[in-house]
Amino acid sequence: MFPVQGKRVLVTSSTEGIGRGVAETFASHGAVVTITSRSGEKLHRALHDLRKISPAVYGTQSDMTNLGSLNSLVSYALHVMGGIDILVVNSGNPPREPITFSEADIHDWEYATKLYLLSAVSLSKLVIPDMISRQWGRIFFLSSWTVREPQSILVLADVSRSPLLQLTKILSRDYGRHGITVNTILMGSFPTEGAKKTLSRYAESKGLPFEQVWKERVLDPISVGRLGDVKRDLGSLLLFLSTDMGSYITGTSILVDGGTTSSVG
């Protein structure tokens, strides 16, 4: 067990996929967790399941592209948990992705910027004062290995997420002496329904079998020869970084990609 019992964790976009796995990981190790979703139905189902693991799981509807909604989310989490020790900023995909630069219009860019960048900025500004008051905190931005190696068909996500690397560095320098660490996690491929749906749309647009595209674009580039496991490969890293054992690691981007990325920088 990692010593995170009683830590208060806010995980966004967390009723399924990556966020759900992260929330479940923290809950199973004794943390108090707040989950979020735009869908009331998904939120209800996830709360029902997660409370079988721990009764200390809360949830509320929230839209990552609506800054007013994020204000309400943080107010809710502070109320029900009494504070926020750990913030995990996770988000879904833009509805029109995969999409190339020539296909994306300005509305797509506005949505993606709100979804990935402005949500992270807003949430950080809202939770950092509470962390400063206790001289301890952890902030994680969940991103993708493709920020290091941008993909034309993921132009919205890769461009809108890349500023988080700079934000991570700046926040780590500004707030490190308050016991707050900030890191970006560059994730590889995990077997989530969201990932499969995104690639399925791409395969359909190219008239290719999904299995072929999944093998060539997802499985073949992974050095270790397997997809990631959210709780084992990602969740365990976040747990470690959330303890005092991880207190010297801040201001950086950490690849959790099974060796997919070929760049060294």
Image: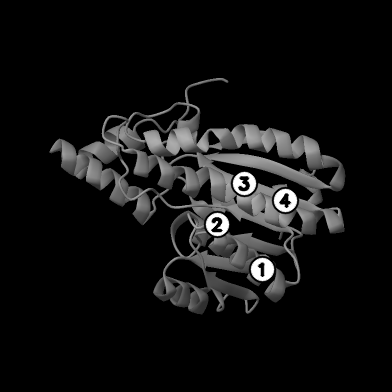
Task: Give the residue drawn at x 56%, y 67%.
Answer: 35
To which residue does mark 4 refer? 138
**Above/below status of 51 relative to 250:** below
Q: Position of residue 151 (x, y in %)?
A: 37, 29
- Say which element carries label 3: helix
Estimate the spatial distance between the alpha carbons at disc 1 and disc 2, rounded to whole Å.
Answer: 13 Å
Label 2, residues with CA under 10 Å away: few <14, some 14-19, many ≥20: some
| Quarter of the rendering containing residue 255 | top right
Label 1, residues with CA under 10 Å away: few <14, some 14-19, many ≥20: some
To which residue does mark 2 refer? 67
To which residue does mark 3 refer? 121
Quarter of the N terminus within the rendering: bottom right
Estimate the spatial distance between the alpha carbons at disc 2 and disc 3, rounded to whole Å.
Answer: 10 Å
Q: Nearer the viewer, mark 4 or mark 1?
A: 1
**Above/below status of 231 relative to 57:** above
Q: Is residue 54 left or right of residue 1?
A: left
- Say which element carries label 1: helix
Q: Position of residue 29 (x, y in %)?
A: 67, 65
Sequence-first disc among 4 and 1: 1
Q: Nearer the viewer, mark 2 or mark 3?
A: 2
Foreground of the two, 119 or 30: 119
To which residue does mark 1 refer? 75
**Amino acid type, mark 3:** Val
**Amino acid type, mark 1:** Ser
Task: Give the residue drawn at x 47%, y 46%.
Answer: 228
Q: Is residue 160 left or right of residue 80?
A: left
User: Of all residues shown, which one is farthest toward the left?
Assistant: 207
